[in-house]
Image (cartoon, grey):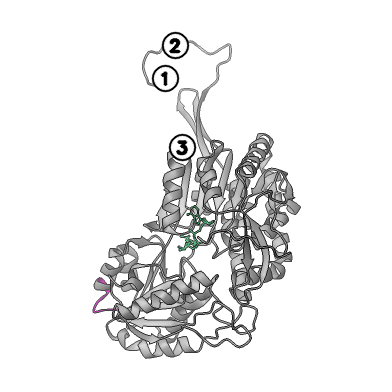
Amino acid sequence: MDAPTRTATKVATVKLLIGGEFVESKTTEWRDVVNPATQEVLARVPFATPAEVDAAVASAQQAFKTWKKTPIGARARIFLKLQQLIREHMGELAAILTAEQGKTLPDAEGDVFRGLEVVEHAAGIGNLQLGELANNVAGGVDTYTLLQPLGVCAGITPFNFPAMIPLWMFPMAIATGNTFVLKPSEQDPMVTMRLAELALEAGVPPGVLNVVHGGEQVVNAICDHKDIKAISFVGSTKVGTHVYNRASLAGKRVQCMMGAKNHAIVMPDANKEQTLNALAGAAFGAAGQRCMAVSVAVLVGEARSWIPDLVAKAKTLKVSAGTEKGTDVGPLVSCAARDRVTGLIERGVADGATLELDGRNPEVPGYEKGNFVGPTVFSGVKPGMAIYDQEIFGPVLCLAGAETLDEAIDLINSNPNGNGTAIFTQSGAAARKFQEEIDVGQVGINVPIPVPVPLFSFSGSRASKLGDLGPYGKQVILFYTQTKTVTARWFDDSTTSHGVNTTISLK
Ligand code: NAD
């Protein structure tokens, strides 16, 4: 993570949200929020002080006393209103997101939309937070469960989906009756703050949603805070593992969605044009900065001859600012991210992979200062090469080959990550074998980026995830609630007494 910078420039400041008020931080540490296509400084984001983190948690703790008792219908109506407000402000939200993050305007709308789906889901909380009841488990005894909110929960989010991922978190946490402290990415916090404003406008009461900004110290303060009950983290494996260990030791419930290396298998019977389009979109869209991006394609048998077609497809993509019409690949989020990606491309060459298409230093008229890397394709990629072993998080597609489907499945199952994978084929038998044998949590069949809709949960696995339950969907209801099981018997004056029962049995 970059260190905070101290800019003297007079630019807008990103506020903290504490107790229903958008307040200026008293910190001395600030970092610039930079447009990655132009290097224009859009705003300065504070690294909140320990006292500010404490104040945010205290306000959430206070608000929990009443929010937890708020009727389901009242909670649901806030999210009905929020989904309406997000729809009304879609263009504005996408424009803020593109300016600070770089992805294209249509993709920024997609980022907001995938979060909006979770808001819509939160509006159905009445059906989601139902307990269970078993009648007459013993004579006159009923057992039922209550799914009760935990208290103050927190979310820590990455830069790559600054609308969708905060919306994975606070709507479901709040809809289930918790209060929330959100720590957005310091690289692009502005669209998240606009969503927080809309949440307040929709009726989220003061203190129920709080936002603090910062980096390592703020994250550590959240992990250690005695009044925070649960933390949802999305980001890199290194930071997620640290958050998981630190917060678990502090007694919290934690879920961490982390880094990835997503493989797509291409069978020779796949529909060629559809597959090439899908691979190019999934590898190079969002400049490869998606945790579910396809970063390795395993070409099986005759499909190994498709490399020139894939390279030709990659060459058709337009690299430019996300605001320019027709752009397919925008800039990487920061100069540091660009340098890291170009450094890994150098490592790929040094490690002996074949550089089929080199996207370094593309010409982007009008945006000469932008952090651009164009679509890049390597063939002959193998485990042990840095471009295979590391998450590149840039528009770089690695091609590997396999003789058979079994060999391709073995390669994927030997990789430690388990976020997403896909197969392209017209064979139901091959697809079903893949679905059964692949050890990855999210599987696409002729779908390159199989991110589940919120009727289901995000279910990455193995090194891509820590914690048992995923964000949104059914699993997150269990994550944000404590199951209380009540076993109840009622006596009235006419009930016959059976005397003292000294056994464990319910009689
Ligand atoms: P990151 O880990 O650098 O940052 C994530 C969050 O952690 C940010 O809020 C950041 O401020 C904080 N942070 C950074 N360094 C820290 C430190 N040393 N100690 C404590 N907190 C720290 O991740 P990123 O670069 O913002 O996002 C990209 C990564 O996120 C990729 O690895 C990507 O695969 C992953 N990601 C995973 C998913 C998923 O669902 N599995 C989704 C999106 C992104």
Which dot marks residue 498?
Answer: 2
Query: Toward the viewer: 501 or 416?
Result: 416
Position of 31 with respect to 444 (left or right) is right
- Amino acid carrying label 3: it is Gly
Query: Toward the viewer: 455 or 57?
Result: 57
Position of 135 with respect to 36 (left or right) is left
Q: Residues within 10 Å of mark 3 (few under 14, many from 20)?
A: some
Asked which quadrant contains residue 35, the reply is bottom right
Label 1 near ligand 1 (CB < 8 Å): no
Q: Do residues under tags 1 and 2 come within 8 Å of each other at their CB atoms?
A: yes
**Where's residue 355, x and y in %?**
36, 85
Q: Which residue is mark 3?
A: 251
- Amino acid carrying label 2: it is His
- Amino acid carrying label 1: it is Lys
Which dot marks residue 507?
Answer: 1
Q: Which residues are magenta?
A: 401-406
